[in-house]
Amino acid sequence: DAKTTQPPSMDCAEGRAANLPCNHSTISGNEYVYWYRQIHSQGPQYIIHGLKNNETNEMASLIITEDRKSSTLILPHATLRDTAVYYCIVRGYGGATNKLIFGTGTLLAVQP
Amino acid sequence: DTEVTQTPKHLVMGMTNKKSLKCEQHMGHRAMYWYKQKAKKPPELMFVYSYEKLSINESVPSRFSPECPNSSLLNLHLHALQPEDSALYLCASSQVSGGGVGGELFFGEGSRLTVL
């Protein structure tokens, strides 16, 4: 079962930051937070992941709260090409927790 | 090369046919996955191979038969499928089969299957 809760949809103006929230209140100590996105009719694309520290790469930033019960994916300057379904996933290492199980995700619509 | 290549992109088959979906990666990844995605739904995990051995089968019906001939190839053999099996089948690979460093999955573009 998916262990995350995300809003079903969000809008963002082009050029503005998109902040996508995710709740994972039952996350355990060995589970990572992963973000993927899926643009229509394409395969999912890995964005970023983290354990407890904030992370940044060329695509996005990931902010994880100190208690690790929630996180926010930040796309600093959203473009129309960022319109996609964004999935927040928790995944452990080893045993049954290492499955990458997709939840329902957030449909981000970037508006011109 | 950071690609996962899936063939064919589209496949139409009858319920009595036998067909196969193929997936290939040359990133040296040791874990490979099959997911199934119905329209407007998230991908559902079907199978996981780790070091060419089947490590996870998510109670998938036997009419779907995975095969991992070597570390670069993953097949999904299809036999006696039902119309409700029509979906996008996604292949993915990762360096390792767990979370953490090397656990990020790289997905192919999928094979869209229609069962008549």
Image: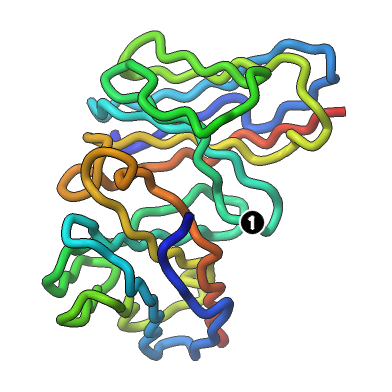
Give the farthest residue toward the right.
B116
Residue A55 location, x and y as percent? Answer: 16, 70
Quadrant (top left/top right/bottom left/bottom right) for the C terminus of chain B: top right
What residue is at 23 percent from the left and 62 percent from the top?
A28
Report the residue marked by disc 1: B41
Q: In which quarter of the image is residue A99?
A: top left
Q: Is residue B94 above or below residue A36?
A: above
* Amino acid on which the number 1 mark rests in the picture: Lys
Q: In this view, does B57 lie above or below A21?
A: above
Residue A31 location, x and y as percent? Answer: 23, 57
Q: Which of A51 and A83 is in front in this view?
A: A51
Q: Is residue A103 above or below residue B1?
A: below
Q: Nearer the viewer, residue A104 or B8?
A: A104
Quadrant (top left/top right/bottom left/bottom right) for the N terminus of chain B: top left
Left or right: B63 as drawn, with respect to A30: right
What residue is at 62 percent from the left and 52 percent from the top?
A41
Q: Mark 1 lies on which chain?
A: B
Left or right: A19 as drawn, with respect to B22: left
The kind of secondary structure element at disc 1 is loop
What residue is at 42 percent from the left and 32 percent from the top?
B33
